[in-house]
Image (spheres, grey):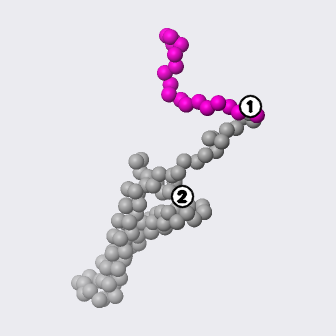
Amino acid sequence: MAGSGASNNKVKYSKLAADDDGYIDLQFKRNPPKVPYKAIALAIFLFLIGSLLITFGALLLSGFINVEHPDRTIPVIIIGVLVFLPGFYHLRIAYYAAKGYRGYSYDDIPDFGD
């Protein structure tokens, strides 16, 4: 039960216009999206590690680097592709969002609960 009748909430109210149609301009204003720096850093890391693993695996598979068991080079390439793809995908979204392309936003990149 409220004691003194004074409100404790910190909600800011704005005065309605005389020709009130039920809408105000503030409800249609979008806040600029927060840039997920940690997610972009993780995407860069995945992209670079995946690129290195693919390159190293290709060099091993082609015989440029001598290995004792050449059949063990395939998993290096597979892991490289699996690490490369999410990094490339999220970097592409971040690049297009930074350039302002239509349909791309930083909201499309998961921020991992930041």
Q: Residue at x 59, y 30 (%)?
A: 13
- Does any portion of residue 82 appear in the rendered image? no
Q: Is residue 58 above or below residue 46?
A: below
Disc nearer the start of the sequence (1/2): 1
User: Where in the figure is residue 108, as x and y percent of width and height?
Assistant: 52, 56
Q: Which is in the foreground here, disc 1 or disc 2?
A: 1
Residue 67, image x, y percentages: 25, 84
Spatial CA distance of label 1 from label 2 is 37 Å
Quarter of the image for residue 15 reads: top right
Q: Main secondary structure of the magenta part?
A: loop
Q: Which residue is mark 1?
A: 18
Q: Amino acid at mark 1?
A: Ala
- In the rendered structure, does residue 99 fall within the stretch colored magenta? no
Q: Position of residue 51 (x, y in %)?
A: 37, 74
Magenta stretch bounds: 1-19
Q: Nearer the viewer, residue 70 or 90?
A: 90
Residue holding disc 2: 105
SS at mark 2 in the image: loop
Q: Amino acid at mark 2?
A: Ser
The answer to which of 3 and 81 lies nearer the viewer is 3
At a point 34% along the width and 88% down the height, the residue shown is 62
Does residue 93 lie above or below 15 as drawn? below
Label 1 CA crowd tier, 10 Å (few <14, some 14–19, many 20+): few
| Residue 56, x across and y down, in percent | 31, 79
Give the residue displayed 49% in from the left and 21% down from the top.
8
- In the rendered image of this protein, does residue 72 appear above or below residue 96? below
When the figure is inspected, residue 66 is found, relative to residue 13, above or below; the finding is below
SS under mark 1: loop
Quarter-wise, where is residue 47 in the image?
bottom left
